[in-house]
Image: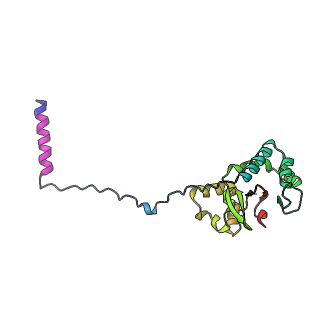
Amino acid sequence: MRCASFAALIAAFVLAACSPAEEEVVLALPPAPDDRFTEVPEAPQVVEVSRAAAKTRDELIHEATKGSLRGLGVIASRNPEFKSNVGGQSHDRFWDLLRRTGVDPNRKLRELFEQPAGLREIDGQRWYVWPDLAAKDAADLIPEKLTFQDRRRLEELIREDGIAKIRAGEGYPGMRTAIAEDGTWIYFVLGQDGEE
C-alpha cells in the first residue's frame, strides 16, 4: 500500500510539473566575479643577497645578539664612510645615547634583518637595504601604491607619523641599514641620512 501511494505521489508531481497552466520558475544566480578586477596579491620580490653581504649581515647579527655596541662599532670602523648619525658623534657614543633614550640599537638591528632585503643602486654600487621598503623611492612608498601586505608592514614599521612624512614627499623615515654587495656596512640610520 505504501508503494502505491508513493507512486501516486510521484505521478501527481510529474503531472503538476509538466502542466502548461503553471508558470515556469527560473532561478537566477548572481554573475561570476570578473577576475580582471580582483586584486591578486603580488608575490613578494625576493632579493638574493651576495655572499659578502650575507657574511657581514651574519656578523652584525652575532654582535647584536651579544648586545655588543662595541662589536658593532668595530664592524662600522672598517668603512671610514659608515654613517650612524648626522651629528658627527662616534658610533658607540650615539648608539649608547639611543639605548639610554629607550631605543636599543642591537634589538633594532636584529629586527631589521628579520625583514626582507631591498636592492638599491647608488653611484653604480649595489646596496642591500633592510627593510626592503626603505629601498623604495618616496613616490613608490605611498600606501595606496603598495600591496595590502606591504601597506600593513609599512604601518607597523613607521606608524602614522611616518606615513604622514611619506605623504609629504619624504623618503622612508624609519630606522634602516644597508650593506654593499662587497660586504661593506654602509649605514645604520634613522631616516634618509645614509644616502646623502
Is residue 76 in view from this perspective?
yes
- Residue 31 horizontal/vertical position (percent): 35, 59
Q: Is residue 124 positioned above or below 11 on the image? A: below
Is residue 112 in view from this perspective?
no
* Residue at 12 percent of width and 37 percent of height: 7
Give the quarter of the figure containing the N terminus: top left
| Quarter residue 28 falls in | bottom left
- Residue 165 horizontal/vertical position (percent): 70, 65
Q: In this image, 94 relative to 38: left or right? A: right
Q: In this image, 17 relative to 185: left or right? A: left
| Quarter residue 117 falls in | bottom right
* Residue at 65 percent of width and 57 percent of height: 154
Stretch of the chain drawn in magenta? 4-19
Q: Is residue 68 positioned above or below 126 on the image? A: above
| Quarter residue 173 falls in | bottom right
Q: Is residue 101 magenta?
A: no
Give the quarter of the figure containing the C terminus: bottom right
Which of 63 and 125 lies nearest the eye of the viewer? Answer: 125
The secondary structure that dominates the magenta segment is helix
Q: Is residue 12 magenta?
A: yes
- Residue 4 horizontal/vertical position (percent): 10, 33
